[in-house]
Image (cartoon, rainbow, N blue to C red):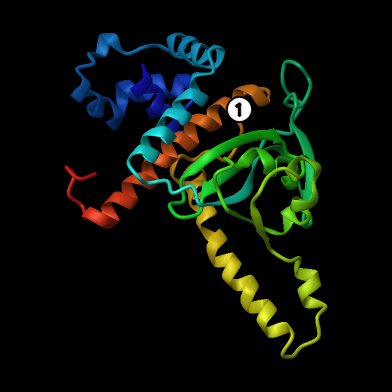
Amino acid sequence: MLRIYFLRQWYGLSDEGLEDALYHSIAMRALADIDLAVEDVPDATTLLKFRRLLLKHDLTRKLFDEIGISLCERGLMMKEGTLVDTMIIEAPPSTKNAEKSRAPEMLQTKKGNAWHFGMKAHIGVDAESGLVHNVVGTAVNELDVSQAHALLHVHEQEAFGDAGYVGVDKREEMKDVSVKWHVAAKRGKIKAMQEGPLKDPVIALEKAKAQIRARVEHPFHIIKNLFRHRKVRYKGLVKNTAQLFSLFGLANLVIARNLLRSVHGSNPSCV
């Protein structure tokens, strides 16, 4: 059931879609390696019960933590620096449903010139490896900086964030945290500077910080583009946050595989 649940996350399938895929798609042939007969394929109701079991016992968070511990033991997570960022996950804004209402706990916010309705995935990422070590789910209108303290593991010496984290070191929840923050300056502030020798080093510094922060985008790429998770799938923050732990845990395995391949090549026995 756990492997089948992973298939659901990898391919962005619904319970009904997964049941159908197990019968009719290439996924069925992949399951031949675990001796699963056609008559043993679980139906959508069984898949729903298993998902509820994971939620009831907070098992997706525990799975995420166990994957992190395993990667740490293998020396893949250095824990000397942390990158923080957020990803907006859209929710259906329509009220054409049985409840005649929008998705519960999902709110809206404006980013640039566009309005977004849904939730945010806040993550803390190891600066060296790009592996995710902390995940927080909130409504989309929650400020990025408000969750910065929850994205640290307290062993890092430095932390990096974009302009959404300006003033993070002055917040009440950060007063007892001994970490040096490197936060991007707001574009308007740099644009307002006079051209010349004073502005050039500031631009160079911001470029260097941006290159370091770029690694935080890798887990988002895996979640959005490889696992096709661009919209919330359930009602409420609790269920959707539980799924985020599964997704980022599996994303960590993809990142770890790529790290090992860069060291050992494509030898499967090493990966």
* Residue type for callout 1: Asn
Q: At which x and y percent is residue 83?
A: 57, 52
Q: At which x and y percent is residue 115?
A: 77, 47
Above-or-below relation of 90 to 52: below
Foreground: 3 or 194? Answer: 194
Q: At which x and y percent is residue 158?
A: 59, 55
**Quadrant where the N terminus lies?**
top left
Q: Which residue is mark 1?
A: 240
Above-or-below relation of 106 to 16: below
Query: Which residue is drawn at the image coordinates 72% and 26% (left, top)?
Result: 103
What is the secondary structure assignment of the residue under circle 1?
Answer: helix
Query: Which residue is drawn at the image coordinates 56% and 12% (left, top)?
Result: 56
Query: Which residue is drawn at the image coordinates 30% and 29% (left, top)?
Result: 27
- Disc 1 crowd rating (10 Å Cα; few below 14, some 14-19, many 20+) is some
Query: Which residue is drawn at the image coordinates 70% and 40% (left, top)?
Result: 147
Foreground: 122 or 30? Answer: 122
State which quadrant residue 63 falls in: top left
Above-or-below relation of 129 to 2: below
In the rendered image, the residue lying farthest to the bottom is 196
